[in-house]
Amino acid sequence: MAIVYGDITPIKLQSVANNMSMNFSLPRYSMNYILQGELKNASKSSMKFLVNSTLGVGGIYDFSSQLGLTSEKTDFGETMAKWGFREGPYLEILVLGPSNQRDGIGKVVDLVLDPVSLIGVGAKSVATATSVAFGLSARSQFRESIDSILYESADSYAQSRLFFLQNRRYELGTNKTEHYIDPYN
Amino acid sequence: MTVINSRRLFLASALGAVFWPKLMVAFEKDAATQIVYLAVHEINQIINSGNTEEQMLKSFEGVFNEYADVPTIAKYALGRDARTASATQLKDYTKAFSGYFATKYGRRFREFIGGRIEIVKVAKVKKYYSVNTIAHMPAYAPFEVDFLVSEQSGQPLVFNLIIEGVNMLLVERQEIGALLDRNSGKIDALIRELKAL
């Protein structure tokens, strides 16, 4: 499905959907940054949301990036990691793909406590539609790499588990204590 | 020898003793950067050569064998079974692994056309050097690739890659392990399968 979406949807339309999806994510980033005590990042993502919603016409244009205003992604899974929760067992969630217990709970919390739903049901449904579209375009961009893991591997479950867990720990910066491999010994 | 001269000599050798390790570190650091620079340069040339995929894969295998410690990587991927394998088996397996690796990663080259890899910084970590790079590829957001270089084989060679936190040696040990399981733990059957992939 992702591949069909990627092939038939013009790049420009995809990038509009991506921008809007990103804009609707920003209040969620702000909320999580506040919960993490990262006030500088929280104000950055709030600022970006304000600029893109006004000058960027409801988030259609990523106006703030041209001003050099960027915001790193975050989520409630990361917030819980900062609070000291362990990642728990690896999970494969239907449709959403590889995850772990902590991030699975995080995804539910992010969905339920999304500040965008405070604006109204309309805003929330637009946000959902654009995030689905963004998910599809991201998946179609990375399709070759994802496909190579899933279809060419002798044990695709084990490989996607390894890829997810290592990449996620790297994103959260919790891989620092991981044992380094010295193949010469 | 006068008193002054011997003092000078003493001073010079003391200075040398203090600075020599630092000089060595700088030299090894340069060697690690150099090897990654050359490998990256050759890979960039292959990507943008306009050759057929088959030719590109062949060139990539050449680069892999020149700049990476293939026997060490292959042996690590095989894990414990490397100890029970005969010398001939290990040699055949290493050759088959080299082809498998070049094909697997080289097939991604189509996505890399028009891209470039930029060296950011080098750091000494325990017994090796970590050369940190950023890959700028047209279809992706920039991502981090660390080339780990060691001189433990006698010359500076790449022995591992860390791509956005994902450790290539671990990935390959798991994959080769799964392939070995699929072939009932028989190394000769594994070699045949690697050649066919």
Image (cartoon, coloured by chain):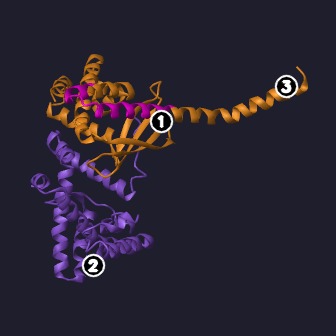
**Callout 2–callout 1 Cβ contact below 8 Å:** no
Residue B56 drawn in magenta? yes
Classify mark 1: helix, strand or loop. helix
The subunit letter for the residue under badge 2 reads A
* Circle nearer the N terminus (1, 3): 3
- Please state the horizontal and vertical placement of residue A83, each as a whole percent of the image: 38, 69
Relative to B184, is B45 on the left or the right? right
Drawn side of residue A48 relative to residue B187, left or right: right
User: Could you tell me if residue A184 is visible in this image?
Assistant: no
Residue at 19% over, 56% down? A11
Q: Which residue is disc 2 drawn over?
A: A115
* Residue A77 drawn at (x, y percent): 30, 66
- Dot 2 and dot 1 within a common chain: no
**Which residue position holds label 3?**
B6
Nearer to us in this view, B131 or A13: A13
Magenta residue check for B193: no
Q: Which mark is residue B69?
A: none
Q: For marks 1 and 3, give the CA distance.
A: 39 Å
Q: Amino acid at mark 3?
A: Ser
Disc 2 from disc 1: Cα separation: 47 Å
Residue behind mark 1? B33
